Image (tube, helix red, strand yellow):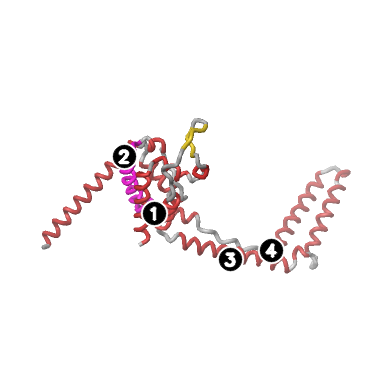
Amino acid sequence: MKKTALIIFILFFLLSFYAFATIEHTMSSIFKQLDVTETDLKEHIWSNIAYISFSYPNPKQLLNTSNSERESIVNIVGNFVKSYTKTEEFVSKYKEYIKSRKPEPPQKPESIDDIKSKQKEQIKKSIEEMETNKKKMPADQQAMFDNAIKSIQEQLKEMDNPNNPAYSKDVNNYIQQGYEQEMKDYKDKLAQWEKEYNGKPDELVKKWLTTFLESTSDIDFNAALKDENGRKIFVNNEFQSKPQIWKLCFRAGKKTTEAARSFAQSWVNELTK
């Protein structure tokens, strides 16, 4: 019994290795066919998922492939994308990404007394500098410094006036209230961040796939086109304003789009379980 189990395990291992080698070979062929490197494709996969977009490194080359090839390419590349999202490289990118999007707590504000103290130090420093510059000037020009210094000294004296509204307790209360509101906003954003990013990229991948499905759900593959300034545009102006992925799938054709949507829906179903 143990011997039989061992044989089954070895066969399973060999078959898995063979299947992996076949996929690798197929992807290598696709890289050449579409004139794109594995590195470029991985960068586009990450960028598309992270920022919910649908760009491709070489779209013209993709459109040059025959209709009969596209459905097969969609499924092979789809499996490549799916496999890549489970790699340590992708997960590492995801962790850096969510860390960069984590909201920062607001800085605790200074009290009005601390603010006044710093302002007074700056004013005193300005007076000292003016006194120094005054001594360097001819006697007949020193009077203008005296007037400026006197004006600044009066400002400094006014800062200690207990009735000065700029430094009242009310200002302290306003500062504290502003800080409390900032803290509330921060906690709300942090809660949303924790809900949206749970340390695993599955929810982000699901959001990307769902956006694709929603954006391509109503494609009219029989939509009429017309020539305008040397390019094809939709006769229906509403179609002309559709998202870029809608137009790309229209050009790719119904079978190709259905293959992509079927793959995406199947993947969403797996992530939902």
* Cα–Cα gap, marks 2 and 3: 54 Å
The residue labelled by disc 4 is 114
Residue appearing at x 59%, y 61% in the figure: 106
Image quadrant holding the C terminus, namely bottom left
Whether residue 9 sits left or right of residue 124 in the image: it is left
Residue range highlighted in magenta:
65-90
The quarter of the displayed image where residue 57 is located: top left
Q: Secondary structure at mark 1?
A: helix
Secondary structure that dominates the magenta span: helix
Q: Does the CB distance between marks 4 and 1 fall below 8 Å?
A: no
Choose the circle earlier in sequence order: 4 or 3.
4
Q: Position of residue 12 (x, y in %)?
A: 19, 54
* Cα–Cα gap, marks 1 and 3: 31 Å
Q: Secondary structure at mark 3?
A: helix
The residue labelled by disc 1 is 91
* Cα–Cα gap, marks 2 and 1: 31 Å
Q: Is residue 88 magenta?
A: yes
Q: Secondary structure at mark 2?
A: helix
* Cα–Cα gap, marks 4 and 1: 45 Å
Mark 2 or mark 3, whichever is nearer to me: 2
Is 269 or 55 nearer to us in this picture?
269
Badge 1 crowding class, 10 Å Cα cut-off, few under 14, some 14 to 19, many 20 or more, is: some
The residue labelled by disc 2 is 69
Choose the circle earlier in sequence order: 2 or 4.
2
How many circles with numbers are drawn on the protein?
4
Q: Residue furthest right?
A: 140
Mark 2 or mark 1, whichever is nearer to me: 2
The quarter of the displayed image where residue 27 is located: top left
Q: Amino acid at mark 3?
A: Lys
Residue appearing at x 49%, y 54% in the figure: 100
